[in-house]
Image: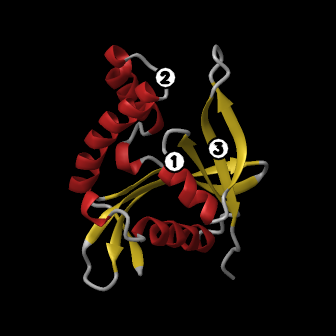
Amino acid sequence: MVRLETMGEELFESYLKGSIASYAEENVKAGHWEEAEAELKAIEQLQQMLPLGQKTEGHDFFKIINKDNNQKLGVIWVGKTDIGGEQVSFLYDIIVDEPFRRQGYGRRAMLALERKAAELGRSAVWLHVFKENEAAKKLYDQLGYEIMKTHFDEISGKTMSFQMAKQIIKSS
């Protein structure tokens, strides 16, 4: 089992630096950005989304912790948003650290996130996944997430990414 704990400042700063690089890389792979501009665009977008960094209202940053040995397994960034008049959690990022991948921790972290969202009174968890991230897409499918919107390249018409969601049962 895993639990989610609020991320400390030092880990947040390290996470943010890594996020800039990986977000830039994902957007280049997906054909959204040119490599030369990607890092700057990633920084700009993250600064717009998180003007106060970790203290930006409506955003939570968690460590994924192994309940058995208290080891950090990865991180999750989730925000609160309104979709169709409902308060939902939007998963911006989930990273399972390299040594712990392919061991079921991503699945367990997603289930922990769904429990956390229910505790907060959210009606659903939404997320965005690039088409190239087949392992993540497969996990979300297995967990019952449904495609709510498909994003296409405007020129080629090729599928680029998906917006997915799962309704959750609120805690009483």
Q: Earlier in the sequence, mark 3 or mark 2?
A: 2
> Which numbered circle lies on residue 31?
2
Left or right: 110, with 166 as reference point = left
Q: Label 2 sits on what residue type? A: Gly
Q: Quick one: 93 or 161, which is closer to the camera? A: 161
Kindly report the distance in space between the C-alpha atoms of the residues bearing marks 2 and 1.
16 Å
Give the residue at the far bottom of this rendering: 68
- Residues under numbered marks 2 and 1 in contact, where contact means CB atoms less than 8 Å apart: no
- Per the image, label 1 sits on a secondary structure element best described as helix
Specify the quadrant that holds the C terminus: bottom right
Looking at the image, what colour scheme do you see?
A: secondary structure
Can residue 103 be seen? yes
Q: Label 1 sits on what residue type? A: Glu
In the rendered view, tell whether residue 158 sits above or below residue 119.
Answer: above
Q: Earlier in the sequence, mark 3 or mark 1?
A: 1
Kindly report the distance in space between the C-alpha atoms of the residues bearing marks 3 and 2.
17 Å
Which class describes the residues within 10 Å of circle 1: few (<14), some (14-19), or many (20+)? Answer: few
Q: Which of the 4 quarters of the picture holds residue 22? A: top left
- Residues under numbered marks 3 and 1 in contact, where contact means CB atoms less than 8 Å apart: no
How many badges with numbers are in the image?
3
Q: Which residue is mark 1?
A: 134
Q: Label 3 sits on what residue type? A: Gln
- Residues under numbered marks 3 and 2 in contact, where contact means CB atoms less than 8 Å apart: no
- Per the image, label 3 sits on a secondary structure element best described as strand
